[in-house]
Image (cartoon, helix red, strand yellow):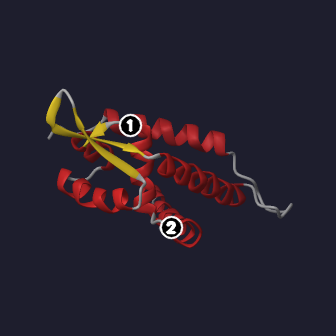
């Protein structure tokens, strides 16, 4: 771990992703990347491939390549937009929504044990304050985006 905030934050994110991936694979039969797809699809119901690619920070080709496996697992459904036959819309299936909810609740509960350990001598973290600080940082960074 470095003494630089940016490096520490990056390393923390990588460690959390690795932990979440192992937990989700073991207990829910999905990867963290698949979980992320489902979260984004759930939050942007009936989004098209372009919208999903932007939210996932991936190319449209990468999003399109992943969808058949999620569709075969009955987690998502693709439909053609009736107002624009070239536009494909993606939504969660009922089963996909249930699996996402179960995985999200489990992941949240597991991470809660990190923030609020059972050991009475361990320091608890103020997750509300941490989240507020991270959202503030996110907003400030987004405001400083460099032009393309």
Q: How many marks?
A: 2
x and y percent of residue 121 in the render? Answer: 84, 63
Determine which quarter of the picture holds residue 126: top right
The residue closer to the viewer here, 49 or 95, is 95
Using the image, determine if residue 71 lies above or below residue 47: below
Which of discs 1 and 2 lies nearer the camera? The answer is: 1
Q: Which mark is residue 26?
A: none
Left-right relation of 87 to 46: left
Task: Residue at 75%, 53% (x, y): give it.
Answer: 124
- Residue lying at the far right of the rendered structure: 120
- CB under 8 Å between discs 1 and 2: no
Query: Dot 2: within a 10 Å radius of its alpha carbon, few (fewer than 14), some, or many (20 or more) residues?
Result: few
Using the image, determine if residue 77 lies above or below residue 17: above
Task: Residue at 50%, 51% (x, y): give it.
Answer: 95
Q: Which mark is residue 15?
A: 2
The residue closer to the viewer here, 142 or 39, is 39
Query: Dot 1: within a 10 Å radius of its alpha carbon, few (fewer than 14), some, or many (20 or more) residues?
Result: some
| Label 1 – label 2 distance at C-alpha | 27 Å
The residue closer to the viewer here, 53 or 57, is 53
The residue closer to the viewer here, 31 or 141, is 31
Using the image, determine if residue 145 lies above or below residue 73: above
Mark 1 or mark 2: whose residue is earlier in sequence = 2
Determine which quarter of the picture holds residue 70: bottom left
The quadrant in which the C terminus is found is top left
Residue ID for mark 1: 44
x and y percent of residue 123 in the render? Answer: 76, 57
């Amino acid at each position: 771990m470095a003494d630089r905030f940016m490096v520490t934050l990056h390393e923390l994110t990588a460690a959390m992703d690795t932990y979440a991936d192992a937990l989700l694979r073991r207990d829910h039969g999905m990867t963290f990347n698949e979980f992320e797809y489902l979260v984004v699809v759930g939050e942007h119901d009936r989004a098209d491939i372009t919208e999903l690619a932007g939210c996932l920070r991936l190319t449209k080709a990468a999003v399109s390549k992943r969808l058949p496996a999620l569709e075969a697992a009955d987690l998502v459904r693709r439909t053609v937009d009736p107002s624009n036959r070239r536009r494909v819309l993606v939504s969660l299936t009922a089963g996909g929504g249930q699996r996402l909810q179960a995985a999200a609740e489990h992941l949240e509960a597991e991470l809660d044990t990190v923030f609020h350990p059972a050991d009475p001598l361990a320091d608890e973290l103020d997750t509300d304050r941490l989240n507020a600080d991270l959202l503030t940082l996110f907003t400030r960074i987004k405001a400083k985006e460099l032009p393309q």
